[in-house]
C-alpha cells in the first residue's frame, strides 16, 4: 500500500536492553514500546522481519560478546541473516576498538590476562560485514548512535511505505 506521506512508526526496544535509547513521539516517530525481541535490541513495529539493530555501548561489551559469550553472539548474527536490513551500532570509535584494552575500565591487573585484542574484534566485525551482510556503524558515542538510528528508522519506514523520496 503506497502512502503520499509516511505514516508514523513505533520503535520496539527489547525488554532485556539495558541503558539504551528512549524514542519519544517526534516528527514521524510515534514513540516506543518495550517487547521481547528474539534478535537485536531495536526494530520497528510492523517491520520486525525487515530491520534489526544490535547496540553495543562500549568496547568492553563487544569484547565479552566476542570472547566468553562468542557462541551466543554468533547465534545472534546467524538469526540476523534473513533480515534485509541488519546493523551493529557501536557507541565508540574505530580508534577505541583498535586501542583495546588500553584506555578501558578494565583493571590493570586483569589486562595482562586478556586473550582478546582490538585487532581481533575488528577482524570479526569485518567478517560479519562481508559474510553476513551486517552493517557496522562506529558512531563514536551514544548521542551520535541515537541520531543515526533515529535517521535509519525514519528512512526504513519511508522505504516500506512511500518509497524513495526524489
Image (cartoon, rainbow, N blue to C red):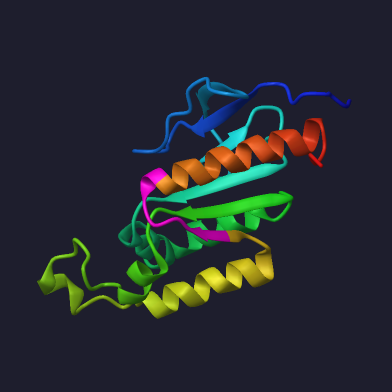
Near-viewer residue (58 or 37)? 58
- Residue 94 on image: x %, y %: 41, 69
Residue 46 lies in quadrant: top right
Q: Residue at x 21, y 68 (%)?
A: 103
Counting from the top left corner in percent of width and height, residue 112 is at 18, 79
In percent of width and height, residue 25 lies at 52, 20
Q: Residue furthest right?
A: 1
* Residue 48 higher or lower than 89, as above or below: above
Question: Which one is in front, 136 or 112?
Answer: 136
Position of 164 compared to 60: left or right?
Answer: right
Point out the image quarter for the N terminus: top right
Q: Which residues are magenta?
A: 136-143
Q: Is residue 63 left or right of residue 165?
A: left
**Location of residue 133 with respect to 33 vertically, above or below:** below
- The answer to whether residue 116 is seen in the rendering is no
Q: Nearer the viewer, residue 12 or 149?
A: 149
Image quadrant in which you'd find residue 70: bottom left
Residue ID at (88%, 27%): 2
Q: Position of residue 48 (x, y in %)?
A: 67, 35
Residue at screen point 45% across, 55% down: 139
139 horizontally vs 47: left or right: left
Q: Is residue 140 visible?
A: yes
Which residue, as the protein is rendered here, is positioned at the far left? Answer: 109
Q: Quadrant of the C terminus?
A: top right
Is 15 situated above or below 164?
A: above
Residue 66 shown in magenta: no
Report the number of numbered marks: 0
Amino acid at each position: 500500500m503506497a502512502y503520499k506521506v509516511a505514516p508514523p512508526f513505533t520503535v520496539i526496544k527489547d525488554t532485556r536492553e539495558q541503558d539504551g535509547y528512549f524514542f519519544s513521539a517526534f516528527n514521524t516517530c510515534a514513540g516506543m514500546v518495550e517487547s521481547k525481541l528474539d534478535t537485536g535490541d531495536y526494530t520497528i513495529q510492523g517491520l520486525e522481519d525487515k530491520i534489526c539493530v544490535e547496540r553495543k555501548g562500549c568496547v568492553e561489551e563487544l569484547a565479552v560478546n566476542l570472547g566468553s559469550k562468542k557462541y551466543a553472539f554468533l547465534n545472534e548474527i546467524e538469526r540476523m541473516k534473513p533480515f534485509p536490513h541488519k546493523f551493529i551500532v557501536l557507541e565508540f570509535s574505530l580508534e577505541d576498538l583498535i586501542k583495546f584494552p588500553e584506555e578501558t575500565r578494565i583493571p590493570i591487573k586483569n589486562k595482562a590476562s586478556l586473550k582478546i585484542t582490538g585487532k581481533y574484534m575488528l577482524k570479526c566485525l569485518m567478517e560479519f560485514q562481508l559474510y553476513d551482510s551486517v552493517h557496522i556503524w562506529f558512531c563514536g558515542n551514544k548521542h551520535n548512535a541515537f541520531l543515526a538510528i533515529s535517521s535509519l528508522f525514519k528512512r526504513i519506514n519511508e522505504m516500506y511505505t512511500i518509497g524513495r523520496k526524489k
